Amino acid sequence: MGIFDVLRSQAIDVIEWTDNSSNTIVHKYDMNGKEIMMGAQLTVRESQVAIFVNEGQLADVFQPGRYELQTSNMPIMTKLKAWKFGFNSPFKADVYFINTRQFLDLKWGTANPVMMRDAEFGMIRLRAFGNYAFRVVDPESLLRECFGTAKTYTVEDIEGQIKRTVVSSLSDAIAESKIPALDIAANYDELANYALQAVNPKLVGLGVQLTAFTIENVSLPEEVEKAMDRRTSMGVVGDLNKYTQYQAAEALRESANNPSGMAGAGVGMGAGVAMGQAFASAMAANQAPAAPAAPAAAAGGFCVSCGQPLPAGARFCPSCGQKQATDAVCPACGNPVPAGSRFCPNCGQKM
């Protein structure tokens, strides 16, 4: 075996990475103590980027495709290594594969309640949760700012920073939107879009970008939820008078069907009487007001012809001229009263 064969056996001539995980963002290619052969085949798959690092300095970046490593397609490495034209010996370098696909269905939530000033309820605390998706858009910034020298970098390593940024931006979005607490549920999409636009500028320095952001739920304080339930109940009930009548009728029916023996019957009867009174009151309140009573008759009674009031002792009606009966006239109902009667035979009025 010649010396060149020995050198080739200690060099790498194929460089590629197959991602078998679902959360690896950066993978450092394992050289296993070998060097890279000039002319080696580099395969970069879709949703991947390969970056060569020479002694801690970022060098050439390779987008998806198949490459034969030469000085012509590694200009930065050639400059850093001071290679002369035609260099074809093995060399040392670190190769990192960055996953640029979307990482989906990641969860976020508020670890502590978010304080919010509401126009109707004053200061309240909100909790929220949802999901988001992100991808690497600037592999070089990610390597400089986040990765370091580890062999792998996963979603778990960066999602904490993303979640904190998301919660902070969402809190600002809710406060600046001035949406009432009772209307937040109807504005999830608007708040999510606002938060998405607010978060991404803060993640530029990390080399990542949110591609989706959704709000699944915003939990209101217990007191606010109770107030919402009361308002909902009032809206369902509608007319309170009709609702009271319905409740009274149901109570009467249940009391009538109570099979609890004599003691229970007594209690049921008492409850039935009370409910009956409530039912009657509700019915009376819901009915139209009665017509006003007829005015009391004047002291002289009423005309037997036209019904108009008569002055006391009048024999003729001043309105129609009708001669009045000689019998007395009841001052209450206006009907004739036989002479000598002490009470009106029609209405009982004392004469």
Image: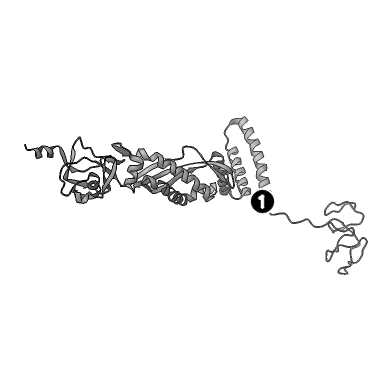
Element marked by disc 1 = helix
Farthest-out residue, left: 1
Horizontal side of residue 322 vs 33, given as left or right: right
Q: Position of residue 23 (x, y in %)?
A: 31, 40
Q: Looking at the image, can residue 292 be seen? A: yes
Magenta run includes residue 134: no
Q: On the rendered image, what quadrant is the N terminus found in?
A: top left
Q: Residue at x 57, y 49 (%)?
A: 235
Q: Position of residue 269 (x, y in %)?
A: 64, 36
Instruction: Say which of 128 and 233 sits in front.
Output: 128
Above or below for 84 versus 264: below
- The secondary structure that most of the magenta stretch takes on is loop
Q: Which residue is mark 1?
A: 286
First to last magenta residue range: 306-310
Q: Residue at x 52, y 50 (%)?
A: 177
Q: Amino acid at mark 1?
A: Asn
Instruction: Say which of 3 and 322 sits in front.
Output: 3
Farthest-out residue, bottom: 321
